[in-house]
Image (cartoon, rainbow, N blue to C red):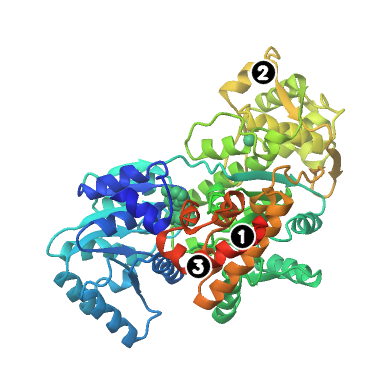
Amino acid sequence: MKYQLLKQYFGYDSFRPGQEILIDSILKGRDVLGIMPTGAGKSICYQIPALIMDGITLVISPLISLMKDQVESLNQAGIHAAYLNSSLTANQYYKALSLARNGRYPIIYVAPERLLSPEFLDFACHVKISMVAVDEAHCVSQWGQDFRPSYLKITEFVEQLPKRPVVSAFTATATAQVREDIKKILKLHNPETLTTGFDRKNLYFGVETVRDRYRAIVDYLQNHREDSGIIYCLTRKVVEDVCQKLQEEGFSVNRYHAGLSDLERKQNQEDFINDRVQVMVATNAFGMGIDKSNVRFVLHYGMPKNLESYYQEAGRAGRDGENAECVLYYSPQDVITNQMFIEHNQDNQELDFVTREQVMERDRERLQKMNFYCLTRECLRTYILNYFGEEASGTCGNCSNCLRDYETEDITEAAAAMAGCVQSCRERYGVNVILDTVRGSKTARIRQYHMEENPYYGKLSRYTIPELRQIFNDLQLQGYFHVTHDVYAIVKLTEKSRAVLDGTELVLRKVDTKAEKESEPEDGRITTRKKTTSSKRKAGAAALSGEDQALFERLRVLRMEIAKEEKIPPYIVFSDKTLISMCQLRPKNLEELMEVSGVGVVKAEKYGERFLHLLALGNGSL
Ligand code: ADP
Ligand code: ZN
């Protein structure tokens, strides 16, 4: 039954990892908690049981745009579904509710604010509710990034129903704290808890430290003219600048940030979703609820404040499972910008002093780990997965570090001198003092602290300060030093550094010999210029042969035509992945067309002939 539904409505032959376990549990009447990364296919986990179970499934979703998107997708697939939220007029709302009473919809999306309203409660108590599915379930947790007080109403609602339905919860947020909160707050009964790996194999990860980030982005866009993508910037001002310049250079871009009017934001978002504009330049205000599946790249013009944010934002690429790219354009200046955000965070005003300090400390720590992501020369994917508590192989072959040639350099002597200096001043100073000492600088602070008398003073005078900072960063990354997260950022020794103190442990680091190093004396940090290694692998349709690409373009035009007729976004008609498969498989009749992943019965009947016609032209048989 479930396989048949998967094929018939969604056009897929098999379930993805985890989906089946969750579906089976639900069908047995057991609560579930599904923790899966974006794009893993959470929706199907509740949609398929919803179709099998007798009664109505209510899906709680935080955003109007998300609901609309999901309901349109279901309707396109031939499934009756509706949403109930504040975007409906009173008339539409009562009409939908009365159809629902008559059993028209097996799946109803509802905003959490509605649940306890008298008319909705009355409805829910007079029909059979078989399941309450909570999408974006981390919204119940104050520890998560998107806490929504209205989510707390869900439990009260469930408790008011005459018979307790199955409760299923889904999220992409992984931390243990949030997971426990979800179970507790939603009062899940002995839930089947399933975490699928956080790895997104179809995403390429890159970090580029370049002199001119703007030019690097222009280069990137020039090489990806056909693709849809997002450029995240740290501030509204940068969004404005970058967007304007790109527009002037003739790129199809638009902007999005919290400073725009509701109307403009809505308009810009719709243009992007419907492929009328290719690239969105935005702050982190953009994205929650963006279900657009054919985002082929997410570029970061600047480093976000932590890896949670980065992975969430970057994860908006490639939801259709086709190859996509996530590139972060880094500058050491980003650390300072983010530090300022942390010091001036307005969200924590109501916290007492001690708690506020703790929050800031935690934020600084997360920022440091984010910064290390940009500095590490080890596999970026491994770094991310380890951060989220997952084991990883160490080399993925699909990130900028795995694809770059590094050489190994012996830094034993520098490590020993730095560790010795830290030890001899009894772990009381910050990085700058330590580096100035071993370098032999003659600054006022060095004199004030009498560091000229330190036995390690001038030991590493052959290096420049930026070089020393780079070495220090590498050592810290490898765990040879710890830097405290309070405002003073004091350097401490670790278990590991004690071994280098006597100079017996061999300490190595990877260096990019092709990188051209140059110092930026004004802030004493190093900038490494690397040739932008726009990855060798091609994303999405670019991987097709020339002839197939031309066909893909024609299919895309047809998809756009249909999207306009149906007034839905193109990716709801068919995903990029489905169009690409069509180019590769070249189906000749409806039967063969339904073999293509993503083509269900209803869509085949509705649009099949038009696509087959184009495919036949492509086959040269007409
Ligand atoms: P999530 O909510 O986890 O971010 P979605 O439910 O939006 O992910 O699914 C992401 C994409 O994967 C959608 O295009 C969906 O149709 C597709 N998908 C889901 N399950 C399967 C499957 N079993 N086989 C192929 N594609 C699938
Ligand atoms: Zn890698």
Mark 1 neighbour density, 10 Å: few (under 14) some (14–19) many (20 or more): some
Which is nearer the N-term, disc 2 or disc 3? 2
Does the residue at mark 2 contact the one at mark 1 (Cβ under 8 Å)?
no
Name the residue tied to disc 1.
Answer: 616
Q: Nearer the viewer, mark 2 or mark 1?
A: 1
Between residues 241 and 88, which one lies in front from this camera angle?
A: 88
Q: CA distance from mark 1 to mark 3?
A: 15 Å
Q: Can you see residue 436?
A: yes
Q: Can you see residue 173?
A: no
State the SS at label 3.
helix
Mark 2 neighbour density, 10 Å: few (under 14) some (14–19) many (20 or more): many
Q: Nearer the viewer, mark 2 or mark 3?
A: 3
Quarter of the rendering occupied by the C terminus? bottom right
Name the residue tied to disc 3.
Answer: 607
Q: Nearer the viewer, mark 1 or mark 3?
A: 1
Extreme-top residue of the structure = 504
Question: Horizontal and vertical percent for residue 379?
Answer: 63, 34
What is the three-letter code of the residue carrying label 3? Tyr
Q: Residue at x 52, y 35 (%)?
A: 386
Question: Horizontal and vertical percent for residue 148?
Answer: 38, 64
Name the residue tied to disc 2.
Answer: 500
**Rendered image quadrant of residue 256:** bottom right
State the SS at label 1.
helix
Between residues 19 and 377, which one lies in front from this camera angle?
A: 19
Mark 3 neighbour density, 10 Å: few (under 14) some (14–19) many (20 or more): some
What is the three-letter code of the residue carrying label 1? Ala
Q: Is residue 141 above or below residue 261?
A: above
Q: CA distance from mark 2 to mark 1?
A: 69 Å
